[in-house]
């Protein structure tokens, strides 16, 4: 039996654009120690291909970046055009 231990909370902000895809504007999630950004993104109910930039505590990060307790993720919409 595997028991998940929730050792940290992470807040995620997206903005109103996420509602278009079934996501939420903001949420707070609990994750186990050692989680990375992609683990947090799996909790979102929206297509990942709509995310353009991921900020952790105001700085750009990749999906493989480590997370820590009380981190704040901000997801910016992918914008295409010219």
Image (cartoon, rainbow, N blue to C red):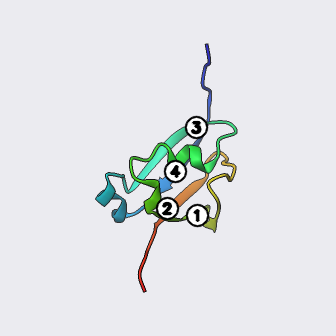
At 65% from the left and 62% from the top, the residue drawn is 61
Q: CA distance from mark 2 to mark 4?
A: 11 Å
Identify the image quadrant of residue 33.
Answer: top right
Q: Which mark is residue 31?
A: 3
Q: Is residue 19 left or right of residue 13?
A: left
Task: Decide which of tag 3 and tag 4 comes sooner along the chain.
Answer: 4
* Residues at discs 2 and 1 in contact (Cβ within 8 Å): yes
At 39% from the left and 63% from the top, the residue drawn is 15
Tag 3 secondary structure: strand
Which dot, 4 or 1, sits closer to the camera?
A: 1
Tag 1 secondary structure: strand
* Residues at discs 3 and 4 in contact (Cβ within 8 Å): no
Closer to the camera in the image, 39 or 68 = 39
Vertical relation: 71 (above or below) 82 = above
Task: Decide which of tag 2 and tag 3 comes sooner along the chain.
Answer: 3
**Residue topped by disc 2:** 75
Task: Decide which of tag 2 and tag 1 comes sooner along the chain.
Answer: 1
Q: CA distance from mark 3 to mark 1?
A: 18 Å
Q: Is residue 54 left or right of residue 45?
A: right
At 29% from the left and 60% from the top, the residue drawn is 20
At 65% from the left and 41% from the top, the residue drawn is 35
The location of residue 3, given as percent across then percent down, is: 61, 19
Q: CA distance from mark 4 to mark 1?
A: 12 Å
Identify the image quadrant of residue 54.
Answer: bottom right
- Determine crowd level at label 2: few under 14, some 14-19, many 20+ residues with C-alpha closer than 10 A: many
């Amino acid at each position: 039996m595997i028991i998940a231990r929730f050792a940290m909370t992470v807040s995620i902000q997206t903005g109103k654009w996420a509602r278009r895809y079934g996501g939420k504007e903001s949420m707070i999630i609990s994750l186990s120690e050692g989680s990375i950004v992609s683990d947090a993104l799996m909790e979102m109910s929206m297509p990942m291909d709509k995310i353009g930039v991921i900020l952790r505590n105001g700085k750009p990060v990749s999906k493989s970046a480590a997370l820590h307790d009380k981190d704040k993720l901000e997801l910016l919409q992918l914008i295409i055009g010219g």
